[in-house]
Image (cartoon, rainbow, N blue to C red):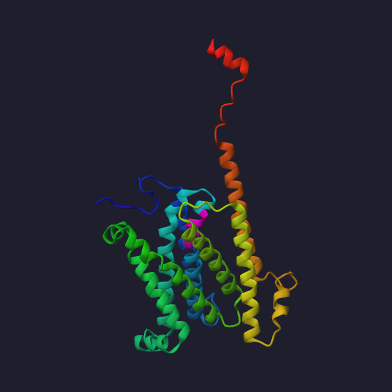
Amino acid sequence: MTVKYPWRDYSGKFSALKAIVFVALFIPGLWIAYALANHLLGARPLIEANHQTGLWAVRLLFVALAVTPLSRLWQWPRLNLVRRMIGVAAFSYIAAHLVLYAAEEMFNLGTVASEILARVYLAIGFTAWLGLAALAATSTDAMVKRLGPRRWQALHRFVYLIAFLGTVHYFIQSKLEVWEPMWIAGLLAWLIGYRAIFWIRGRNTRLPLWGVAALSVAASVLTGLGEAIYFTLAFPVPIERVLLANFSLDAGVRPSWVVLGVGAAITLGAVLRRGARQKSRPAAAAPLSAVARKSVSN
C-alpha cells in the first residue's frame, strides 16, 4: 500500500504549494494551544480558546470555498490541489471547537446535549458541525469512487448551506461584536453569487472581469444594507445613518469596505494573471508580405 503524503500531488511529486499550505494550517491551532498552556487567553482561557477555534473553522471553510473561484479567475488550476486539505482542516478546527465546549462543561455530555437543544445558536452550530463531518468523512478518493462523481458532488454542494449555518451561528454568538460576522456574510454573498452565475450559465462560462468587479460591488452593497438593517432592528438607530457610515471612513473600516476590498483584490489578481499569461504566449507568426509570398512561391 502506497502512503500518500499531504505534500505530494496526484502524480506523487513534491508540491511546494501543498507543503506550504499544510504547514500553514497548523499555525493557528499551535498558537491557540501555546496561548492556552501559557495563560495568554485572559480570565476565561477555555472560552477564549473555544471562540478562537470556532473562528478559524469559519475562516478556513470560506478559504476552501474560495479556492474554485480563485483557480478559475486567476487561471491557476493547481490551486485546487489544496481545496480538500483546507476543508478537512476546517472540520478539524470545528471538532476542536466542540471538544473545548465540552471541556467548559466538564465533559458532562448530558449538559452539553441539553444546552445544544435549548439554545438556538448552539443547535445551528451543531447542525453545521454534523454537515461538515459528513463532508470530511467523504472527502477521500475512495469515497468519491464509492458514491460516484454525481452523488459525491450533490452531497458536497451542501457546503454552502453549512457555510450559511456557520455564519448564522457566529453572528448570533457574537452578539454586539458583529463586525467580522458581517463581512464574512458579505463574502458568502459573493461566493454564492459567483456560483449562481455558473449554475445558470453553465460550468464553461468565463466570467468577464467587469462581471467580477460588478459582483464585488453588489456584495459590498448587500453587506452595507444588511448591517444597516441589523442595527436598525437591534437598536433605535435610523437606517440612513448606518448606510451613510458605510460611505465614509469616519466610523472606521466598515464590513462593506472589507468585502469591496477583497473583491477588488480578486479582480486585480485576475487582471495581472491574465496579462502575465498573454505576455508569456509566443507571438503569432506575422503574415507574409506580398514580396515574401512571391519569393516563397518561386
Quick one: which residue is furthest to the left in this view?
1
Determine which quarter of the picture holds residue 123.
bottom left
Q: Position of residue 137 (x, y in %)?
A: 33, 66
Determine which quarter of the picture holds residue 266.
bottom right
Question: Was residue 18 drawn as part of the magenta stretch in this picture?
Answer: no
Question: Would you say 176 lies left or right of 145 here?
Answer: right
Q: Is residue 231 visible?
A: yes
> Relative to 126, does residue 272 appear above or below in the rendering?
above
The quarter of the image holding the C terminus is top right
Question: Would you say 291 lies left or right of 86 here?
Answer: right
Q: Main SS type for the magenta part?
A: helix
Q: Position of residue 250 (x, y in %)?
A: 75, 72
**In this orientation, which residue lies closer to the viewer: 123 or 284?**
284
> Relative to 122, does residue 183 appear above or below in the rendering?
above
**In this orientation, which residue lies closer to the viewer: 47 or 191?**
191
Residue at 51% across, 77% down = 168
Residue at 44% across, 80% down = 124
Q: Is residue 38 visible?
A: no
The number of callouts visible is 0
Q: Which residues are magenta?
A: 65-70
Question: Was residue 66 drawn as part of the magenta stretch in this picture?
Answer: yes
Quick one: which residue is furthest to the top in this view?
298
Q: Position of residue 27 (x, y in %)?
A: 49, 62
Question: Would you say 66 lies left or right of 227 here?
Answer: left
**In this orientation, which residue lies closer to the viewer: 37 or 205?**
205
Q: Position of residue 246 (x, y in %)?
A: 70, 72
